[in-house]
Image (cartoon, coloured by chain):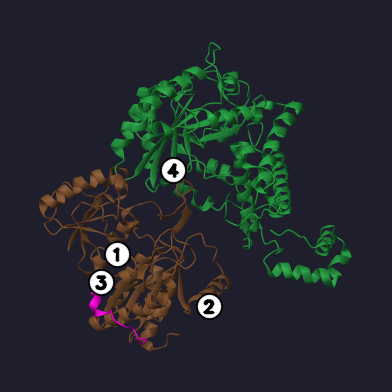
Amino acid sequence: MITLKDAEEYAQFSRLSANENAALKNEGIVKNLEKYQQMGYLQENCVTRIEHPEVPYLEYYLQNRIQYLILQVTQQCNLRCGYCIYSGAYPHQRTHSVQKVTWETAKEALDYYLEHSTDASRVTVGFYGGEPLLALGLIKRCVQYVKDHVKGKKIAFHITTNGTLLDPETFAYLNEQGFQILISLDGGKTEHDRNRRFVDGTGSFDVIMNNIRRIRELYPEDVKTIMFNAVMTPQSDLSCMMETFRTDEVLSDHHVMFNDVADALGDDPEAHERFWSLRRFEYLKFYLALGNKLPWSAVSPMAERALSNLYTTYEQMQGREQMTSCMHHNGPCVAGSARLFVTTNGDLYPCQNVSELYDYFRIGNLRDGIDVEKVRRLVNNGIITENRCIDCWKLRLCSICSQNIKFGGKTITEDDKMVNCRQQEGLLLDYLMTIAILRDLDYEMDYGAKR
Amino acid sequence: MKTVLFPYTDDMEVILVHDGFRDLQIIGADSFPENRVRIPESRRIDLSDSVGAEGLVILPDTLPEGEEEIRRISGITRERGIPVLRRITDETDRLNYEPLKKELPVDEYSGMVDKRYPIPVPVVMIVSAGCSCGKFETHLTVSEEFEKAGYKVTDLCSNPLGALFGMYTVPPFLDSGTIGYGEKIRTLNKYVWCVYQKEKPDVIILSVPGGVFFRTDDPKEPYGEYLGIFSQAVEADAVILNIYDDMQIDTQEDMEDLATNLQYRFGFSVYSIMRQRVIARRNEETGIYEYYHLPLAGRKEEDLVINGKDELKETVAVLIQEMQEGTSEV
């Protein structure tokens, strides 16, 4: 990627991009074109086909290299969070139910995973809900089963919990088994209890913090391994949330992830504007700090996340390796291999984020195994827009996973995917503008360096 | 020597394929419960069962996750007097083992290196695009074919498991942080010459650790310098290059471009390019490369062969013929 600072060069390229016929007859323009071509830019497009590079190896991956099993142990939860995807507010997602996995199905899922992960370097099992700690007894059985059947690989267990049932005894068990624990906590009491409430409507903050304090007293070092996930909604007071995690004596030692719930905004343009303007303000402060125009104390940790994405894109933009005739955009993982999500009734999905109501995403079941063709469709989603992708300037920079595409549930059409394509274009143009502005602020993004 | 293999890995599968080569006899293989199913049924044994007193058990380099199981096995082998071989030393290891290596004693090659030692016999060098790209299996097959053709072969193998077949392993000075690049080249040249003097072979086969293109995750050798050292230390008469399965080198033009690139960078001519059924992928969680050996149609016993052995044998047969006729271009 280059930034044109020379006014004459800029004018020349403007004429080219405006498709002026005479431009290519101009000696100066041709000379500049050749200069950049020798540097590896402005190469002829050689892409003739869109195919994901892992397509030839799908059968191998699905047979031998399933890396991460996520087991839905229950669909029940003791909270009714306002923004929960299972709250009934999302038409393409299921709702809470009393369904829970039987030991027979859980064992079948573990056996399937172990049999199909012989070439994976480690064993990773995650427990998901609802609220997974409602099925602690079953989780314990699963943990022991894995440990009895895996002797030569590192084993990792993950759990995402609302924290209300994470008493010190439960924490001690999970910690001893090497669990990575992620607690959902949306900042201080006001922010958290706005959405995260028990079934009877009372807030859950006090119960969670009481648990964490007790764990902290008994296990002052081990407690630090707990991570938190904070969800930001349009009503969230961002600065208050940030301040809580930064200064609270119990929470400040922990790693926190922040996630937006933009989907909950619906079609309210004012809500969208409010939501994004707050974020843009945080990102602006961050970029000003990079250019030494603002102290870092004014910058929120959430905004630092933005830089990570920006750097990734910047590094991708630097790439001048010649593309090959067969390419595919980023986004799709190897569905079913990178992650395999098993529901309470033994159905298989590529991850826990997809809709369990859409057969499009159901890639098989424990009895029949994984349908390779369905996986191929998810992994190779570039062919939906093949003709557009072949000629697209951002093919190498784009990232579209099928899970993020809104569609009717039966099949993803080109029009469906083009919505995401336009969003990607907007995002990349934003990044380009940001990089140019940072350069104007005398901040150079060194290749491979991070703040 | 009667040998038992544990655990079952891609390297162990290669050894199993070459059962019987140079007096190595594999009694069977056992593994951790999670991948015991990979072992062909007819070759699967339970280590707890009685094995011959000569049996050797080969353990992996380091396996903290499997320590409990390895201790159990070590208990069995100690009780029966079976020596245990391990690939690489682990200073923190408390288990009894013998290191798997074959090297010249230092005093046989140390000292000032003030000249270049020409190697008076043909040298076949096996290199690869990156790590774990099938060099070990290629090396074993090439050595076998030369021996069948009546040649006396001496090997320097990039994989320490080569010592099971009497091959010299990578000399320790190549990993030294106290001698420079140039010194390593000169010392390796002398080392190979000393090996020649000791063994008096008809041909030397070398496989070079690391790769041509990929930055490795080996902290000792992050920038793939081995090939630069080997190619300058020893003049190869034929270089066999292994590439990964998904490398887009499909046309004659692609191969010629690749050969020109390597000629420019390392000064050797590629005799043959062998596509291996191996792919390299970076693990997102750990950030390091992992190498996957893709099986041929299922894992039946007759499909133990990982790579195109017939093609390689043909290539070696042609090479041998050219060398005998003196018509080899390299």
- SS class of the residue under badge 2? helix
Label 2 crowd bin: few (<14), some (14–19), many (20+), radius 10 Å? few
Q: Colour of chain B?
A: brown
Residue in front for this viewpoint, A154 or B187: B187
Q: Return the chain for callout 4.
A: A
Q: Position of residue A201 (x, y in %)?
A: 56, 12
User: Mark 1 or mark 2, which is nearer the start of the sequence?
Assistant: 1
Q: CA distance from mark 2 to mark 4?
A: 40 Å
Q: Of the residues shown, which amino acid type is indicated by label 3?
A: Glu
x%, y% of residue A162? 49, 24
Query: Which residue is identified by label 3?
Result: B103
Please give the residue where the numbered disc 4 appears in the rendered image: A67
- Magenta residues? B105-116
Residue A265 pos. (x, y %)? 69, 26
Q: Quadrant of residue A12?
A: bottom right
Image quadrant occupied by the N terminus of chain B = bottom left
Mark in front: 2 vs 3: 3
**Residue at position x 53%, y 50% from top?**
A55
Question: Which label belongs to residue B264?
Answer: 2
Question: What whole-number distance in Å separates the C-alpha atoms at marks 3 and 4?
Answer: 39 Å
Mark 3 vs 1, N-terminal side: 3
Palette colour of chain A = green
The amino acid beneath tag 1 is Pro
Above or below for A19 versus B330: above
Let me know if marks 3 and 1 both belong to one chain. yes
**Residue B6 vs residue B123: left or right?**
left
Residue type of the residue flagged with mark 2: Tyr
Chain letter of mark 2 equals: B
Which amino acid lies under the numbered mark 4 shown in the image of this protein? Gln
Q: Are marks 2 and 1 on the same chain?
A: yes
Q: Which residue is mark 1?
A: B160
